[in-house]
Amino acid sequence: MAAISPSIRNFVFERANHCCEYCKTSRRVIGMPLVIDHVIPMSNGGTHDPANLCASCYRCNEHKGSKTQVFDNETNVMVTLFNPRVDRWLEHFIWGDGGTHIIGLTAIGRVSVIGLRLNNPYVVESRSLWVARGWHPPLESP
């Protein structure tokens, strides 16, 4: 399959306001480029269609890998990870501990926090610095 075109890449990043669509971290804050994530991985039949693409930070992309579901200990079933193309962030997550932690409100939110390691110690430490500077959390998370 052909590579993702520069125009589609730009569209995906602009649609996401240059923020990771999973953890909502701004490219401007982390000082690194975002990457394109296939919501449904290519290995699972996903395509380069913009409806299957989202902006992701390296950390979320690495932790997501080819996962599309994670076991939810609360409901004892496999649950689909957060899909930025169909799910609304604010329905599944809130900011906790002054903006340093992402809290899952739903099964999708819970498994995404775990599966993507959205509160790993390194990012929590960074978020505390960003919060102190007033750069985080985002005022509104679409």
Image (cartoon, rainbow, N blue to C red):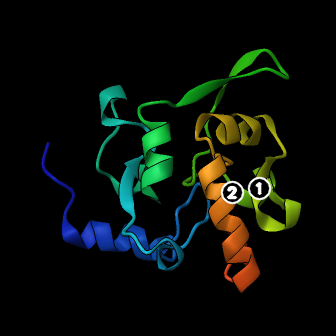
- Residue type at numbered disc 1: His
36 displayed left or right of 86:
left
Q: Which residue is drawn at the image coordinates 21% and 70% (left, top)?
A: 6
Residue 72, relative to residue 54: is it above or below? above
Give the residue drawn at x 69%, y 57%: 124
Where 67 falls versus 28 (above or below)?
Answer: above
What secondary structure is marked by label 2?
A: helix
- The percent position of residue 26, horizontal first and vertical second, equals 54, 73
Q: Earlier in the sequence, mark 1 or mark 2?
A: 1
Q: Are marks 1 and 2 in contact (CB under 8 Å)?
A: yes
> Is 84 placed left or right of 105 in the picture?
left
Q: Is residue 121 left or right of residue 102?
A: left
Quarter residue 130 falls in: bottom right
| Label of residue 101 in the image | 1
Q: Position of residue 133 (x, y in %)?
A: 70, 84
Q: What secondary structure is found at the residue carrying circle 1?
A: strand
User: In percent of the image, x 62 and y 25: which residue is there?
Assistant: 70
Residue 65: quadrant of the picture: top left
Looking at the image, is mark 1 or mark 2 nearer the viewer? 2
Q: Residue at x 79, y 14 (%)?
A: 76
- Circle 2 residue: 124
